[in-house]
Amino acid sequence: MKIVTVISIFFLVISLNSFAQVSQGKITVFNTTLKVKDIIGTTNLSTQKWSKDLPKVLVRNEDYYLKTIGSYREEYDDLDPNSLFNLVDKGNYPLLDEINMRFYEEFAIPKLKGDSTINKRSDFISFCQSWEKTTDFKDRKLLLFKNEFIQIGKVIQKERFQFVYAPYTLKQNIKRKINANLTADIKSELKANNIEASASLINHLSSIVTSQTEYSGVMIIAEFEDNYMTRLKNSLNGLSKDRLGNDDFSIGLRFYGAEGGKRVATTGLVVFKLNGKINKSRLVESNLKSDLKAKFKLLTDDQISAITTSMSIGFVRKVENLFSADIENIYIKSFLTSKKVDQIALDNTIKALVTEYDLGKDDGRNMGIIGGSLDRYYVENGTYPSDLTQLKSQKAISAINKIGALIVYKKESTDSYILTFAGEDRQLNTEDDIIQRGYKGKPEKNN
């Protein structure tokens, strides 16, 4: 397996709601468009191969990104997760379930018994009583998903993770941009209530609001607990084929542990989270009235009443709604991979079997890429290329580099081609060869 300690892929992921949107290199948060680099230091998303559909990689809440930890990626810069160590649902995964149940028994539950915020909970006490009545891993796992233990079950399973929290302060230029939009919102709110306000009045109201508005951020390093990662490595590294079954975890482990594989586990994430809040105590009607009477002598009582009502009720509610909608803005900055987990490999027998299977799978994928590129070339140019060097797609070039020695391409006519691929024996010009023909932008496979 490829050993990687920290993979600094700066992917930006944003909660999807009416207030948060993403465009190349920019985000909109609290109704303010900001440069991504001002938030988390990313300078240019285009260089990070940002090609996936955003909804596929959204971080909506804590549950989502905690479930992402433990998945693996086909290659280090892939975004699509494949389930592996994060298979903690009600399914039956004997190898992983045994590791998890032992971890809960020997580490998580004893730790929680010493936690005064947990050990007196009635559901925890009842859970421990039921847990101690059985030693069967299957029965113990089912306890975690019983209706009466669902919430405490989540607490216990969360012990597989460790967290480091580090508050950070948003840059002043970010605060100024957000506050500038609050000023515009004040003017809009007054106008919506048929209140014409002078620039000095709007500026004064803006200074009051911005002085009572706070923005903060926290960096969270969420990763597998060290003890848990050690257990994964000690239990799975060099595993005998006799221990593997046909469940999803065993199947995933076959792929992940294959010799020479480029797969990388996501054992942690560096996460940034933004928060906003408004202190309403200074913005109640009585306080605003006193303030405006003292500062703006020409305003009548009715005018002051209209302004303060508009501000203290309508405007504050809008800001609160805005912050509450954006409160779960979470940005993933980096994927982390522990050497402990990344070094997990199966025994030589399994490696050989899986490598052979993987090789065929990869060959098929690369043949598909080349065939697809040939079809697109025909659609765009009205003819097939005279040779494969005319394909300019980066994916096609990569595929050709990987299997170029195993294929022979021939353009038969303007509208057809023949592509010969060495089969399982990986030798050309044998009975095992696979022939793929293309005609007018469509593939036709023949052996």
Image: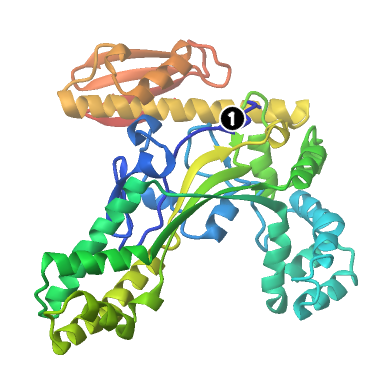
Q: Residue furthest bottom?
A: 302
Q: Position of residue 32 (x, y in %)?
A: 28, 55
In the image, 407 versus 219, the foreground residue is 219
The residue lying at 65 percent from left, 26 percent from top is 3
Describe the element under mark 1 as helix, strand or loop.
helix
Q: Quadrant of the C terminus?
A: top left
In the image, 42 versus 144, the foreground residue is 42
Q: Quadrant of residue 341?
A: top right
Q: Residues within 10 Å of mark 1 (few under 14, many from 20)?
A: some
In the figure, is residue 253 to the left or right of 380? Answer: right
User: Which scheme is used to colour this image of the protein?
Assistant: rainbow
Work out whether 14 lies above or below 270. Answer: below
Q: How many marks?
A: 1
Work out whether 440 lies above or below 24. Answer: above
**Residue pointed to by mark 1:** 358
Work out whether 266 lies above or below 195. Answer: above
In the figure, is residue 422 to the left or right of 326? Answer: right
In the figure, is residue 82 to the left or right of 169? Answer: right
Q: Quadrant of the N terminus?
A: top right
Q: Quadrant of residue 426?
A: top right
Q: Position of residue 356 (x, y in %)?
A: 63, 26
The residue lying at 80 percent from left, 32 percent from top is 238
Q: Position of residue 85 (x, y in %)?
A: 67, 47
Q: Quadrant of residue 17?
A: bottom left
In the image, 138 versus 185, the foreground residue is 185
The residue lying at 48 percent from left, 33 percent from top is 77
The residue lying at 45 percent from left, 37 percent from top is 10
Q: Position of residue 254 (x, y in %)?
A: 67, 37
Residue type beneath disc 1: Asp
